[in-house]
Image (cartoon, helix red, strand yellow):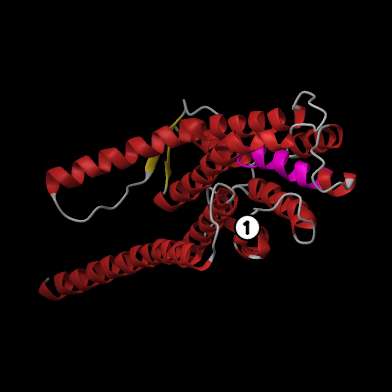
Amino acid sequence: MDCYGHASGKQAGKIDNTRKNKEYEFLYVYMFFLSALGIAYQTYEGLGLSTFITLAAALQLLAYGLLALKVVHQQSVRGVSGKALQCHACVYLSRLSSTTWLKGYIPSDGTGDGLYQLVDILSLVMVLYLLFLIYKKHRATYQESEDDLAINYILAPCFMLAVLLHPTFNDRPLFDTMWTFALYVDVFAMMPQLWMVSKLGKEHGREGLDAMSAHYIFAIAASRGVNFAFWLYGYVEFAPSDGGYNVAGWAVIVACIIQILLLLDFVVIYIKACLRQCMNVMKQGGCMQMPPMEVNGTYDI
């Protein structure tokens, strides 16, 4: 019995050490992200409001990095929407078709001379890697039946709207349309993920949304907030030179508001979970570790 108890204790200790190592790895991702922000702040001059565009792109890259690390650790893509990532891939391909060689829709500060485009390229690479994990390497764990929101009903209307309503900063109708298409798709790109979370909650009563999936969605939400902060002041740049009504500018504002509203319910749940865990830590002492978030059947998008 003593030998058995000793072996069980060693195994439990090994599991605890593995869990702690994984937690440290996620902490290193955050530390690297903050360090990169600090280096960029010291490297580039003339940073201002337009830098928010690059910051929003960087937060999205952080989100994909956290999600990829989660999938690699768990060797599973349970709870991850492949269709949401397909929408994100469309966003980056469309946006990069404009921003890599045209100057109409890039930050006016130093980050627009390469850093902004590099961040988008890295995000595209990360999204394609995640799609490979979902549809090839870990397809057996992909919950395809729950990821059933038809994205053609997102992509087709967004493209038609972009053709009809787009700014003209590039003065090239095709690439103005492609940039605007990316903007409109980005509004709804997280809908398949939120739909999947909602459906899992309704089917299973309560579905644990693990911490790193929660951080992934929250990082996306944070990027949406930063993006909205920029366009709240920058939409006036789309105003017609003849003094006409700023239809394109208001279309961007409406798109940003829809983005925020789609993720607002989740953000409230996320913040409540963090506050609840902080209170538990203060009462019990010890290290803080965010528990799985409970999503019940009433989760609504």
Instruction: Name the one closer to the observer, 182 or 14.
Output: 182
Instruction: Name the one closer to the observer, 160 or 240.
Output: 240
| Residue at the right extreme, as displayed | 173
Would residue 146 be seen by someone viewing this image from the given angle?
A: no
- Residue 182: percent from the left, percent from the top? 73, 45
Q: Amino acid at mark 1?
A: Ile
Quadrant location of the C terminus?
Answer: top right
Please give the residue where the numbered disc 1 appears in the rendered image: 134
Q: Quadrant of residue 244?
A: top right
Residue at left offset 60%, top offset 47%: 81
Instruction: Name the one closer to the observer, 104 or 165.
Output: 104
Tell me which segment is drawn in magenta. Answer: 177-191
Quadrant location of the N terminus?
Answer: bottom left
- Residue 254: percent from the left, percent from the top? 65, 28
Compared to residue 289, the image places residue 274 above or below, namely above
Determine crowd level at label 1: few under 14, some 14-19, many 20+ residues with C-alpha closer than 10 A: many
- Residue 190: percent from the left, percent from the top? 60, 41
| Residue at the left extreme, as displayed | 2
